[in-house]
Image (tube, rainbow, N blue to C red):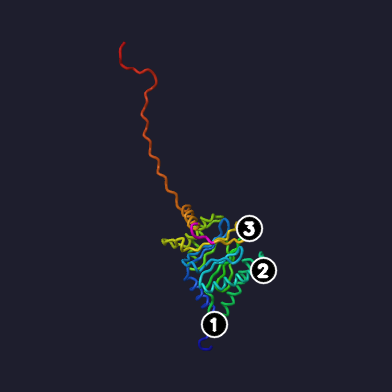
Amino acid sequence: MPFGYVSPEQQMRDKADYARKGIARGRSVVVLQYEDGILFVAPNPSRALHKISEIYDKIGFAAVGRYNEFEALRLGGIRYADINGYTYHRDDVTARGLANLYAQNLGQIFTESMKPFEVEIVVAEVGDSAEEDHIYRLTFDGSVFDESGLVAMGGQAEAVAGRLKERYRDGMPLAEALEAALFALTEPGGERSPASQLEVAVLDRNRPHRKFLRLNGPRLERLLAEGSAAAAPEAPTAPEAPTAPEAPTAPEGDIDTGSTG
């Protein structure tokens, strides 16, 4: 065996460990279904570098890891969607097609390059009903997972997903879904990210044509306030004070005044 030989199996393990460590260094991103579509939430103090973006009419993109790497994937997805939508029909552009494209690219990079991409991404498509929504999660090696309801990636993804499952339910209103996402993204005993350091967007099935919408400013603050108020436990009501017993009343009839006739 030549000096310095590394088996292909060990090379793949080393690449996978390298990519996982890079992804875990970032903050988590949460994607979940709500009453009217799909919600994306990410702690992000930068106003210039987005973790959440629009790909096409009803398709959104979220990512964690190295910004330059997942930004290259995002731009490639937009070019693919534009070309296919123009050449064929806009309805022919689907999240499934994009997921397959990303899986091929990530798998090829992982296998052939010395350094794998340190990224994990979600491609989500909103349908006319919740049953027609699609959420695909792709890992650094090109593996594709068809998620249902919710997904957390990056950072302490398992812990975040566990907390999210505690609050998640089907058909949640937007404010309640946002509250559940923030609960999941906040470590126990930690402080929540303020509205100015959150990146929030939705794929709203009720919007005409383009479904993607960023939530920020007063609208986001109002949703945060509504979610906090709904999640706050109701204040216990004080027990009623016992009432004093009523004084006995004299029997009805003539009253003897003690006078003589």
**Range of residues picked out in magenta:** 214-218
Which residue is under mark 2? 86
**Other-residue count near label 1 (Cα within 10 Å), few / some / many at <14 / 14–19 / ≥20:** few
Q: Earlier in the sequence, mark 2 or mark 1?
A: 1
Instruction: Return the residue at label 1.
Output: 7
Percent x, y of residue 156: 47, 67
Q: Is residue 166 visible?
A: no
Amino acid carrying mark 2 in the image: Tyr
Measure the C-alpha gap from mark 2 to mark 1: 46 Å
Q: Position of residue 48 (x, y in %)?
A: 50, 68
Identity, as a three-letter code, of the amino acid under mark 1: Ser
The one of 70 and 7 positioned closer to us in this rendering: 70
Q: Amino acid type of disc 3?
A: Asp
What x and y, as percent, mark residue 242? Answer: 38, 38
Res 188 → quadrant: bottom left
The residue singled out by tag 3 in the image is 128
Q: Nearer the viewer, mark 1 or mark 3?
A: 3
Q: Residue furthest bottom?
A: 2
